[in-house]
Image (cartoon, helix red, strand yellow):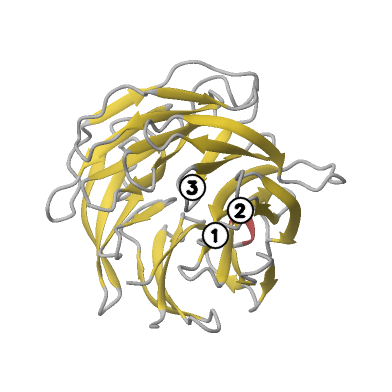
Amino acid sequence: MSDLILFIGSTPEGDKPGKISVYTVNNETAELTLHSENTEIHSPGFLALSTCGNFVYTVGGPFNPNANDGMVSAMRFDKESKILTLINTVSTPTNSPCHISVDSKLKMVITANYASGTFSAFPLNDDGSLAPASYVEKYEGSSVNETRQTASHAHSAYFDPDENFIVVQDLGLDCSFVYRYDGSSKLSEPIQKVASAPGAGPRHLAFHPNKIYAYRINELISSIDVLSINPGTGEMTLVQTVSTLPEDFTGESACADIHVSNDGRHVYGSNRGHESIAIFDIDQTAGTLSNLRTVDSGGEHPRNFALSPDNNFLFSANVFTNTVKRFSRNSETGDLEQVLDILNIQQPMCLKFFSC
């Protein structure tokens, strides 16, 4: 198997511009080799890849001090030279996009827009470029946290594995919104609002390979919700909530990212404050989680992490210490063990692998 490609999105730091770095990753050792850096996007805080990595989509666009920050961009990736080139940038048309996803057929890009509390959808042209937004939904309301939940804060938007539905997590409203998706740009209002516990602050979502369970990580109370999914209707039901923190932890912490292993046996979630990756076993019948254990994330504020396509490695991006820590993954137990020294890289906000 050839080496993997890893994209790392970094935001500006001091006089250093934001950038997207392109690395190859050795399949056996997790050694990284830097091939190129693109600085055309001012603040690429989250990335989405087309199925085989020919296109990269990112929140943010070229720096413009006179424009609002509501931009998303399309980039073309040359696999031979390993160089990214900007195709185009469009307005969201609301501000603060924080998460982006693309469907496998290159029909649609979707974004969650934190500050404005909106969800946006953008059709894609045949050349991979972005068309203007075809759908924008603004959410209204608040929840119980008087600091973080005075209004909607849409934090992530995902296609389900079969791409029949879209699920948007709203940290400010303590819920997920479910939309039907038929591959066209004609979206309509949500078909379901899936509540979390009051004050939980849903942030990200990961689907089980069996497609009948999903796992929603809650930023504000450091927990994971287990959701069962009706495959026909897309409707979700909350079946369990578990803490991501050890019982004896007494400090402040907030969750960030979440992923499910390809074999469907383990869930991983990141804790910022406890500075760890939480590991859970998945009950293969009920989809529920058990046996929490944690490993040190290798730095401060693990905002994002990624499993390699073969799931042999996990890379943790620690924003406040400008580091990426590399772990080997035990496929039987799901546990993680550091394999290499820490990689130093500016403000690593998002990690994305592809191996086509």
Please give the label number shown on residue 207: 3
Q: Quadrant of the C terminus?
A: bottom left
Q: Amino acid at mark 2?
A: Val
Figure check: 71 above or below 258: above
Q: Secondary structure at mark 1?
A: loop
The residue where tag 2 is placed is 267
The spot of residue 27 in percent (x, y) is 48, 81
Please give the label number shown on residue 261: 1
Viewer-closest of 177 and 162: 162
Q: Is residue 232 visible?
A: yes
Report the Cα–Cα distance between label 3 and label 1.
Answer: 10 Å
The spot of residue 95 in percent (x, y) is 37, 33
Q: Amino acid at mark 1?
A: Ser
Q: Quadrant of the N terminus?
A: bottom left
Q: Mark 1 touching mark 2, by CB under 8 A? A: yes
Viewer-closest of 299 and 261: 261
Q: Amino acid at mark 3?
A: Phe
Ranked by sequence position, the earlier of labels 3 and 1 is: 3
Report the Cα–Cα distance between label 1 and label 2.
Answer: 6 Å
